[in-house]
Image: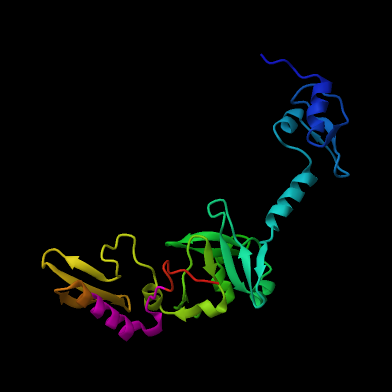
Amino acid sequence: MSRRKTHAEFVEQANERNIDVIGKYVDDVTKIKLSCQLHDHEWLMAPGRVISGRGCKMCGLERLSRKLTKKNEIIEDRGNYLIIDISTKTYPSAKMAVDTDVWMKYKGGKVSANLSKKYIDARCQIAKNKRIPFHHFVIDVPAGMEIDHKRHGDLAFVDNRRSNLRIATNSQNTMNQSIRYDNTSGVTGVRFNKESQSWTAIIGYDRKSIFLGYFKSKDDAIIARRDAEKKYFGEYAFRVNNKKGVTKC
């Protein structure tokens, strides 16, 4: 059985948490009058709750307020756009590019990185229990349409400037995606068919899969796929912008 604390021992523990003891300590369950050293606030509480981490309600509200209103730091100001810190524990180096006027207009809570396929997007709070991708705040999306990033970022950067966003159909948005992790040919929509011992090419359009044919060589299959991309998607066809397909700011 553990030894009961003395009044002096409890006072010392409470003082370590900026709490003054006004009443007399009896045991861990008998409520005692306490006072906050940081706020003009007195309250009754069981000493055991103080020992376990509870304390001044005003201090707790202050900490909660700081947490809820934490602002994203501006890492760089490049005139017409900003580089914003959207880091989280999972993505400690995450940043976002955003037009200066858009950031000044946004007056919500924390904007933070969130995994989207093989790259991050930025999520923001627009209501108590509603978070949306930040690019939906940047531009309005007509019903039945989606927002496409012309140049995708990576796991540390996302470009949400208006110049990098465009309205797209689902097919157009799907077209502008990076290669699947299980792709073996290195080209989206091109694979080797073991049964026919030939290369095949397909493309998805209007939520349908269009077969482009069998080819003796991989190069011919790639050419057929690229021609189909130009035919069906034009500017929305996926293009690698640099070695990693990452936007450069």
Q: Nearer the viewer, residue 37 or 193?
A: 193
Does residue 177 lie above or below 50 as drawn? below
Which residue appears farthest toward the left when viewing the image?
A: 196
Residue lying at 78% horizontally and 35% vertically, measured from the top left = 17
Q: Nearer the viewer, residue 89 or 51?
A: 89
Where does the image place residue 90, in percent across and percent down from the top left?
A: 53, 52
- Whether residue 175 appears in this view of the structure is yes
The image quarter in which residue 50 lies: top right
Q: Is residue 76 magenta?
A: no
Residue lying at 57% horizontally and 75% vertically, measured from the top left = 161
In the image, the segment drawn in magenta is 222-240
Q: Is residue 215 left or right of residue 89?
A: left
Where does the image place residue 89, in percent across and percent down from the top left?
A: 56, 51
Where does the image place residue 122, in percent across and percent down from the top left?
A: 55, 64
Instruction: Look at the image and name its color scheme.
Output: rainbow
On-image quarter of the N terminus: top right
Where does the image place residue 176, in percent across and percent down from the top left?
A: 39, 74
On-image quarter of the C terminus: bottom right
Residue lying at 30% horizontally and 60% vertically, measured from the top left = 182
- Whether residue 131 appears in this view of the structure is no
Does residue 222 lie above or below 232 as drawn? above
Does residue 39 lie above or below 131 as drawn? above
Which residue appears farthest toward the front when viewing the image?
A: 243
Dominant SS of magenta comes to helix
Q: Is residue 225 magenta?
A: yes
Q: How many marks?
A: 0
